[in-house]
Amino acid sequence: RFGISESSVCDINTTWIQFLFLQFRRIRDRMFPDRELIRANMPKCFSKFRNTTVIIDCTELHVEIPRDFGRQGNCYSPYKSHTTFKFLIGIAPNGAIIYISDLFEGAISDKQVVLQSGFLDKLKPGDAVLADRGFVIQDLLNERHVKLNIPPFLNGRNKFTPQEEILTKQIAKLRIHVERAIERVKKMCFPLHCRLL
């Protein structure tokens, strides 16, 4: 369309993404709003989860295989069966993106991303975090007196109780908002398969 190669477009996109990252990094601490502001804009669908401050999820971006063998192993994601970068995203219940971590190599666990990203420093006692089952971070949140709302586990049983099924569906309906936010970020920032390594 523009008479230039795909690699040139990727280079331009990567340059602008890095520039925007440096510009917006300065305001990152102000992105995470106070609990009162979050509650003032709480959608009705969160009535059973009124203390929810943030909904979190990790997502991964496919990247070229690094030349360095050590980095190849660190970037290989068993979940995606490819080399990736992973980041944590958090949204307020009203859908506003309020947290995006730095990128981590794809082999890192979701728990380690939460631990190393600085996300925990944003939370205050009495907050609640909504996430999927992969976030086994209750021990990290207990130290900060923060509640974790995740779907229940079967723990060796054949099926959930009726109450657990209802809870699972309620959380899944609310978590869809973070999935939509991830799609928006990917479409906005990574429209082409760019060379990130």
Image: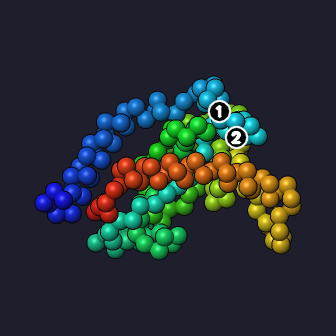
Question: Residue 184 in the image: x percent, y percent?
Answer: 45, 49
Which element type, helix, strand or loop, lies under badge 1?
Answer: loop
Residue bearing the label numbered 1 = 42
Label 2 sits on what residue type? Cys
Q: Residue at x 76, y 62 (%)?
A: 153
- In this rendering, position of residue 101 left or right of residue 121: left
Does 113 appear above or below 65?
Answer: above
Q: Residue at x 39, y 65 (%)?
A: 62
Residue at the far left: name it. Answer: 3
Q: Which residue is drawn at 46% across and 60% down?
A: 60
Which residue is more in the foreground, 126 or 17?
Answer: 17
Does 176 appear above or below 42?
Answer: below
Question: Residue 170 in the image: x percent, y percent?
Answer: 73, 50
Does 6 appear above or below 69?
Answer: above
Q: How crowded is mark 2: few (under 14 residues within 10 Å), some or many (20 or more)?
A: few
Q: Residue at x 61, y 39 (%)?
A: 93
Label 1 sits on what residue type? Met
Which residue is more in the foreground, 78 or 67?
Answer: 78
- In this rendering, position of residue 5 left or right of residue 50: left
Residue bearing the label numbered 2 = 45
Report whether residue 160 is seen: yes
Residue 54 sits in which quadrant?
top right
Which element type, helix, strand or loop, lies under badge 2?
Answer: helix
- Give residue 133's mark: none
